[in-house]
Amino acid sequence: MPEQTTTWILVCDASRARLFAETGPTRGFSIVDAFEHPSSRERARDLMADANGRKPGGGARGVGGNGRQGSAYGRPGAEPDTDPKDVEAMKFARELADALEKGIDAHVYEALVIAAPPRFLGLLKETISDKVRKRLTHTMAKDLSLLPPRDIEKRVRAERVA
């Protein structure tokens, strides 16, 4: 009798994720874990602003037009160097990549399927290790994160057969 393989299915977007396990084509998906990253749902200006609505001052970037250092209250109207939403998405991608890595290290799954919106899927694929990437058997550039588990199962299975 062939050995039963376990496939993990990660369904996510930049702020939430559910990790399912599939132990066979006739068995349903079972939930392994759920992840939330509420900061990814924040408005960009709320992620980068202090209580006064300013970026923190200091350093060469905190120098004002008159040559003086930025004040303790920061500098108003400054554009962020990196989009704060992208920074939060990267943090969440790293968290998910760590969970996938731990699953491999614990020999919990043999194959991996990831479903995520195109932009976050690309970010996640860049973030996962080579060890995890070798287990990646299928990707879906679709946001299924808000669907109920039964619908996720139907969509993932249909996509893998197609």
Image (cartoon, grey):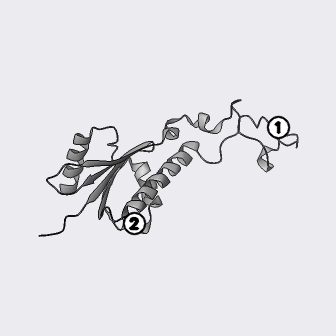
Quadrant holding the C terminus: bottom left
> Is 83 drawn above or below residue 3 in the view shown?
above
Front residue of 131/138: it is 131
The part of the image, by quadrant, that contains residue 151 is top left
Q: Which mark is residue 105?
A: 2
Task: Please report the residue visible at 22 percent of the width from the left and 55 percent of the height from the top.
Answer: 160
Q: Amino acid at mark 1?
A: Ser
Q: Amino acid at mark 2?
A: Asp
Q: Nearer the viewer, mark 2 or mark 1?
A: 2
Task: Please report the residue visible at 40 percent of the width from the left and 68 percent of the height from the top.
Answer: 131
Task: Please report the residue visible at 54 percent of the width from the left and 43 percent of the height from the top.
Answer: 85
The part of the image, by quadrant, that contains residue 6 is bottom left
Q: Residue furthest top?
A: 52
Kind of element beneath mark 1: loop
Q: Which residue is mark 1?
A: 71
Q: Position of residue 103 (x, y in %)?
A: 37, 60
Q: CA distance from mark 2 to mark 1?
A: 48 Å
Quadrant holding the N terminus: bottom left
> Is 126 drawn above or below residue 150 in the view shown?
below
